Image (spheres, rainbow, N blue to C red):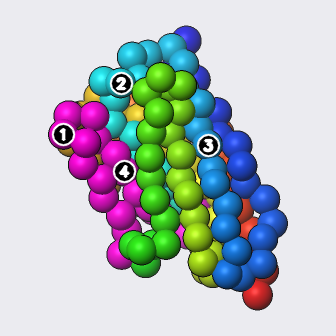
Amino acid sequence: QVQLVESGGGLVQAGGSLRLSCAASGFTFSRMSLGWFRQAPGKEREFVAASSWGNDNTAYEDSVKGRFTISRDNAKNTVYLQMNNLKPEDTAVYYCAATTFSSVVRTRQNYNYWGQGTQVTVSS
């Protein structure tokens, strides 16, 4: 049974940091590309960051470049999202996702598996 379980969300002041974790099970983690998405109230789920397994590439949405870092620990079957210099507009539910594609994937339709999400709230 495939499971993705996010943790690490919470309430933080603007300028602060959080590290999200996503623990995976039920599939060969090292052969899956991974992504983080977020969804704010009343908005569509949007791409945040991705990490490929095929060539170790990463990709970021423009507004988080230089502030967020995606990383993975294949030994722990875990993907992380380090978020620094958080802004109120980063407030959303954050989801991790996994896909069998070997390259970075920015489109949510190409992801096979999803976690349940973790809330991140940034106060001004």
Structural crowding at the residue carrying mark 4, measured as other residues with C-alpha within 10 Å and reported as few (<14), some (14–19) or many (≥20): many
- The mark closer to the camera, 4 or 2, is 2
Residue 50's disc is 4
Q: How far apart are the two marked residues, 2 and 3, measured between alpha carbons?
A: 16 Å
Of mark 4 and mark 2, the one earlier in the sequence is: 2
Q: Which residue is mark 3?
A: 21
Structural crowding at the residue carrying mark 2, measured as other residues with C-alpha within 10 Å and reported as few (<14), some (14–19) or many (≥20): some
Residue at 18% over, 40% down: 55
Q: How far apart are the two marked residues, 2 and 1, measured between alpha carbons?
A: 12 Å
Q: Which element is circle 3 on?
A: strand
Question: Disc 4, disc 2: CB below 8 Å?
Answer: no
Give the percent coordinates (x, y) of residue 2: 52, 18
Q: Is residue 108 at all visible to an observer of this figure? A: no
Of mark 1 and mark 3, the one earlier in the sequence is: 3
Question: Disc 1, disc 3: CB below 8 Å?
Answer: no
Q: Amino acid at mark 3?
A: Ser
Residue at 67% over, 81% down: 15
Q: Which residue is mark 1?
A: 55
Q: Quadrant of residue 84?
A: bottom right
Residue 110's disc is none
Question: Disc 2, disc 1: CB below 8 Å?
Answer: no
Q: How far apart are the two marked residues, 3 and 4, measured between alpha carbons?
A: 14 Å
Residue 56 vertical position relative to residue 84 in the rendered view, above or below: above
Of mark 1 and mark 4, the one earlier in the sequence is: 4
